[in-house]
Every structure is written in structure tokens, then in C-alpha cells.
Amino acid sequence: MSPRTITLHDCDFSTYLYEEEIIARITILAEQINQDYEGKNPLFLAVLNGSFMFASDLMKRVTVPCEIAFIRLSSYRDMESTGNVKEVLGLTEDVEGRHIVVLEDIVDTGHTVHNLINQLQAKGPASVEVASLLLKPDCLQHKLEVKYVAKAIPNDFVVGYGLDYNGLGRNLRDIYKIVS
């Protein structure tokens, strides 16, 4: 497949990851999760808005008994993380004694995940792990272990497959990176 270029707002983006590769990588993550959580009934916490496609495709492939809930946190403005994480839609499930898997679309600075893990740990879960579609290891500003990563990427701004640029691009099946 040849790369496609799209324009969102004032920026051009070219194809970076095709849907087929994304699904193949999610399938591998699901197999790891199925092994690790056999007999544990994990609670998946999908961080909205960005993780909705990742969460949907992952959950279709998770075969262990589990539950899913949705939370909404925000730390982004335009293409930059503000560093200030604010809870928009909170957690209503009791997580005490539960095995929690946080589902993220992308972990870059780590501000959002770091803050969320701290909030969750205070509620006494049995364990908390993170599964992310994408990880930007060069951007991390917190010591974090993201146990399940579909793909590590360089510090390129990406959109599609749930990721957006000022609201646009979440519906794209592929992932696109900004054209320099």
C-alpha cells in the first residue's frame, strides 16, 4: 500500500500504520493479557476519548472473563500535553482488590497515566497495569512501566484510530503522522 496524505485543520499527515498491522499487534497483546489474567477477572479501564477504538478491538480478542469501564481524563491542548491532568468523568466501579488494566491510546509524557495510577493505587486494587496502543519512550517524564505496548514510536505527532488533532481524525482506520 502506498502512503496516503490527509489534511486536518492546518496540518498534513501521511499514513504511518495501516489498520491490518494495528489489528495484528492488538491480537498479540490480547494473547498476552489472556495468559496473564487467566482466572483473575480483570477490570479494564478505557481512558476516553482516544482509547475507544483500541479498547473495542482489544476487548473483541480478550477471552478471559472480564469487565470494562470508561473514564475520561484530559491533559492535551492542540499538539502539546499541558501537564495538568484533570478528571472529567470519574470512576464509579469499586476497584479494591481488583486486577486493573488501564487502556490508553498513547503514552508519551506519561502525565496522564502516572496521575491515574496514583489515584487508582489509593483505592487498594490487587494490581494495576497499563496497556497502550502506542508508546513514545523518548518523551516519558515519569518512571512508568507500560506492560502491554502494541508499538513504540518516535516523537512524531500522530492521528487516527482514536487519536485526534483538535477533534479531527479519531475516525480514521489507519494511523497517520504529521508531515514535517
Image: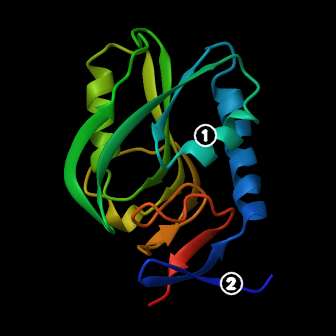
**Label 2 environment density (alpha carbons within 10 Å; few <14, some 14–19, many ≥20):** few
Mark 1 to mark 2 CA distance (whole Å): 25 Å
**Side of 161 where 123 appears, left or right:** left
Give how far across and how far down residue 144 sits, in percent: 35, 45
- When the figure is inspected, residue 20 is found, relative to residue 47, above or below; the finding is below
Q: Amino acid at mark 2?
A: Arg
The answer to whether residue 143 is visible is no
The answer to whether residue 171 is visible is yes
Give how far across and how far down residue 140 sits, in percent: 32, 58
Give me the residue at 21% from left, 58% from top: 82
Closer to the observer: label 1 or label 2? 2
Could you tell me which quadrant the C terminus lies in?
bottom left
Q: Nearer the viewer, residue 69 or 142?
A: 69
Give how far across and how far down residue 130 sits, in percent: 47, 38
- When the figure is inspected, residue 116 is found, relative to residue 25, above or below; the finding is above
Give how far across and how far down residue 1 sits, in percent: 81, 81
- When the figure is inspected, residue 133 is found, relative to residue 180, above or below; the finding is above
- Mark carried by residue 55: 1
Q: Which residue is mark 2?
A: 4
Mark earlier in primary sequence (1, 2): 2
- When the figure is inspected, residue 178 is found, relative to residue 142, above or below; the finding is below
Q: Quadrant of residue 11?
A: bottom left
